[in-house]
Amino acid sequence: MTANPVKETPLKILSCLPGLLLLSACSFSTDQSDDAPDGQSASAPSASAGDPLHFADAGGPAVAFEETPVLRAQVLLDRLGFSPGVIDGEEGQSYDAALRAFQLSRGLDESGKLDQPTLAAMQEWSDVPATRLVTIPAAFAKGPFFPDLPDDAAKQAELPTLGYKNLMEALAERFHTTPDALVALNSPDTKIGAGKVIRVPNIADVAPLAGTDERDWSATLQKLGVASKQPTASKLVVDKSEGVLKAYDADGKLIGQFPATMGSSHDPLPIGQWTIKGVSHNPEFHYNPELFWDVSDDKDAQLLPPGPNGPVGVVWIDLSKPHYGIHGTGAPDTIGRAESHGCVRLTNWDAARLAQMVKPGVKAVFQE
């Protein structure tokens, strides 16, 4: 398969949204493992105007727009590390959980609602708008894209990467949202393509990594809007009852929370205490049919290429329990509403952020 060049396209849904009951592949092994950077701050220098992946602010509104309190709260929560999942202006389980995490961090009543004390606490960032108008950079728009990604593992193994299907999907991941939400933020006849202006959730640009860049990780972070410098996590807690992964620092302070899909009736979450063994950026996936209850053992094992639409997304955080880990997904809107093969699945942007927070030896507690 060859990648199609990007053309200016009306802003509409370019691919069908996945079903709600998707099973992510989990039984995984890789030889590519490296320590995550030991970041101390969630802030990082912004990408400069000369950076090819910089989304320059564009003046003049494309359509009349008035932000809603929920959309604004979702953007702020995401920027603070208390992920609401996809930013879509809708209330739901992941949004409520993110609000509770923010409220806990500020010593507020954990109502899970956008109440007056919570709104007052968010006034600290009153100068941060919920959306911005940006110009799509040519380097981002050129892909490559793969509109006809096959479902068959043998055919996937023949591809150079399991990349985005189209520019719409890539833009949605960059701004932590969905194609549907991008359509809602813009006029239906808005064009997408290099040099075109589009309204997006206000997820800031980040600068490239300094120094050695392995496996295109710097560009991956830029394409996901994830800063390389993050607070350091000393302990993770995967809470099945709440449907979230929580990150704590050495003082026991909650410094990050992400909605997660975890296990199924066939492959339940492995309750217990585990240890992070390593972090693999843009990993290949060792597909072994014998490890999946819903795949025939007659199928051949395959080595699948890396990519955001691969079975484990852009990152694999390896655990001390064999074949189990924390990873990304190519279907971010299914997080918390689907099943997995026992692993812990996050959006690609949340998984990338977590990867910058952890290193080998960090404890990961899985609890009911």
Image (cartoon, grey):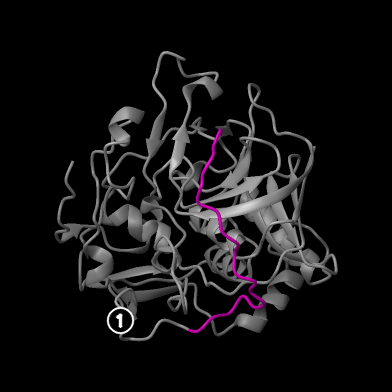
Label 1 crowd (10 A; few <14 / some 14-19 / many >=20): some
Which residue is rendered at x = 47% and y = 19% of the image? Answer: 295
Relative to 196, 183 lies left or right: right
- Pick the front one: 109 or 94: 94
Element carrying mark 1: loop
Instruction: Identify the image quadrant of the N terminus.
Output: top left
Can residue 190 be seen here? The reply is no
Instruction: Identify the image quadrant of the C terminus.
Output: top right
Relative to 187, 288 lies left or right: right
Does 40 appear in magenta? yes
- Pick the front one: 198 or 240: 240
**Main secondary structure of the magenta stretch:** loop
What range is drawn magenta here?
27-45
Residue at which label 1 appears: 58
Q: Position of residue 283 (x, y in %)?
A: 46, 49
- Pick the front one: 200 or 41: 41
Relative to 180, 45 lies left or right: right
Query: How many dots with numbers?
Result: 1
The vertical placement of 207 against 216, above or below, is: below
Q: Position of residue 362 (x, y in %)?
A: 74, 57
Which residue is rendered at x = 64% and y = 26% of the image? Answer: 267
Q: Amino acid at mark 1?
A: Ala
The vertical placement of 70 against 308, above or below, is: below
Q: Position of residue 237 (x, y in %)?
A: 76, 50
- Pick the front one: 363 or 265: 363
Quadrant in the picture for residue 121:
bottom right
Does 204 appear in magenta? no
Quadrant in the picture for residue 153:
top left
Can residue 218 be seen here? The reply is yes
Q: Position of residue 235 (x, y in %)?
A: 77, 58
Residue at the limit of the structure toward the front, as seen here? 31
